[in-house]
Image: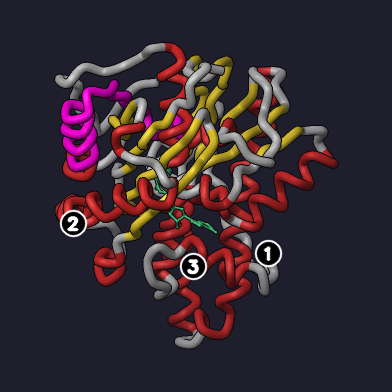
């Protein structure tokens, strides 16, 4: 650990949340997120509207993060931002802001991969237990579904990922079919808690190896609902809890089966999850059960660090700061970015 406190201001603007956090030596002093409600009426994120909202939100969100942390701009050691992956217009708001601030204050600039940050959120200095290297990361969000072998902070390898929709999209698109508002994942979770997970059976996709596919499941659910509502126009209203529980159960089985394969293939049985979908109560329960039934050791971050947030960007940046891994002002944002 360095002698002087390292204060990092971190920004996250890859999709539809504008977030800023201040960390002191890996401890979160503030973690502010402004959600963009403008997308609800469209049933999904509208990229152009997201970048406009980031522009409106970024100054007040950064001010709130500094105020909550009681840290002056002049005390900052570095500024970090999400370099990618994400929506280009959204990423550019965060990177331009970070570059300007780094130049104005004369402090280092640190670029972070959003997906690595979801995994590194487990290293935030708090009461949650921390996985030991090597471990498997399962990142499940609205944009990604990946199984990653994590050998060190920045030594990560993707060993499985979705070939089409992300698992969060499977939740959100199912919710849309059921007439639930965006983002539907949390609502499916809520209904599922009062439903029978075995009420309906959906065929699981057959994808070789550790990769995933969720678009076929979405289509199967659509046809199922169309058929059932033809027979009974009130089918959704009368069975919403059972439908949600059955869909959620199918998704969880797909994830657990692939994790099982990954643990066998790698010999690693520590699993750390991240991304918005890891807030799902069914997934959390299934992982806790796997600790008992399969001998896995599972790690679930605090709720505020699972969905998109800037504290995870800050902890990733802290390790880059310690390694002296800085960007120059010409660094470019990337919609797609390798590990
Ligand atoms: O990581 P995140 O906040 O943003 C992305 O990078 O995508 O993840 C958002 C996704 C959305 O698809 C949302 O529906 C899903 O996470 N989500 C959930 C739950 N909470 C959020 N899905 C299922 N159950 C939940 N409780
Ligand atoms: Zn994310």
Depth check, mark 1 against mark 3: the one in front is 1
Residue at the disc numbered 1: 197
Magenta span has 218? no
Lower sequence index among marks 1 and 3: 1
- Tell me if I can see residue 138 in this picture: no
Please tell me which residue lies in front, 214 or 134.
134
Q: Main secondary structure of the magenta part?
A: helix
Label for residue 188? Answer: none
Judged from this view, the residue extending furthest toward the right is 292
Near mark 2 (Cα within 10 A), the count class, few <14, some 14-19 or many ≥20, is few
- Of residues 88 and 229, the one drawn nearer to the viewer in this rendering: 88
Q: Position of residue 159 (x, y in %)?
A: 52, 23
Tell me if label 1 and label 3 are in contact, CB under 8 Å. no
Disc 3 and disc 2: Cα gap in Å?
42 Å
Based on the displayed image, in which of its 4 quarters is residue 81 positioned? top left
What is the x, y in percent for residue 320? 42, 19
Would you identify the image quadrant in which residue 245 lies?
A: bottom right
Judging by the rendered image, the residue that carries numbered circle 2 is: 56
- Name the residue beneath numbered marker 3: 224
Q: What is the magenta range?
A: 93-117
């Amino acid at each position: 650990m360095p002698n002087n406190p390292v204060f990092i201001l971190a920004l996250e603007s890859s999709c539809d949340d504008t977030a800023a956090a201040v960390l002191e030596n890996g401890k979160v002093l503030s973690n502010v997120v402004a959600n963009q409600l403008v997308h609800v009426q469209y049933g999904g994120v509208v990229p152009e509207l997201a970048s406009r909202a980031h522009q409106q939100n970024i100054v007040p969100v950064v001010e709130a993060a500094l105020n909550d942390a009681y840290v002056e701009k002049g005390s900052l050691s570095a500024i970090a931002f999400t370099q990618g992956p994400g929506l280009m217009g959204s990423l550019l708001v965060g990177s331009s802001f970070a570059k300007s601030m780094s130049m104005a204050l004369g402090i280092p600039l640190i670029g972070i991969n959003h997906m690595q940050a979801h995994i590194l959120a487990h290293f935030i200095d708090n009461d949650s237990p921390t996985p030991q290297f090597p471990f498997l990361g399962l990142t499940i969000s609205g944009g990604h579904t990946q199984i990653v072998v994590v050998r060190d902070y920045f030594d990560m390898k993707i060993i499985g990922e979705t070939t089409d929709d992300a698992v969060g999209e499977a939740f959100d698109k199912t919710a849309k079919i059921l007439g639930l508002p965006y983002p539907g994942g949390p609502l499916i979770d809520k209904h599922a808690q009062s439903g029978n997970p075995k009420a309906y059976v959906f065929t699981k996709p057959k994808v070789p190896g550790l990769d995933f596919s969720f678009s076929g499941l979405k289509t199967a659910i659509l046809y199922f609902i169309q058929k059932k509502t033809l027979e009974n126009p009130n089918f959704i209203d009368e069975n919403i809890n059972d439908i949600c529980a059955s869909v959620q159960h199918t998704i969880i089985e797909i994830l657990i089966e692939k994790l099982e394969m990954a643990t066998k293939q790698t010999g690693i049985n520590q699993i750390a999850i991240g991304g918005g979908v890891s807030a799902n109560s069914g997934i959390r329960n299934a992982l806790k059960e796997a600790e008992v039934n399969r001998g896995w050791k599972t790690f679930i971050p605090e709720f505020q660090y699972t969905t998109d947030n800037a504290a995870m960007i800050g902890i990733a940046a802290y390790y880059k700061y310690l390694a002296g891994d800085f960007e120059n002002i010409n660094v470019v944002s990337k919609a797609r970015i390798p590990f």
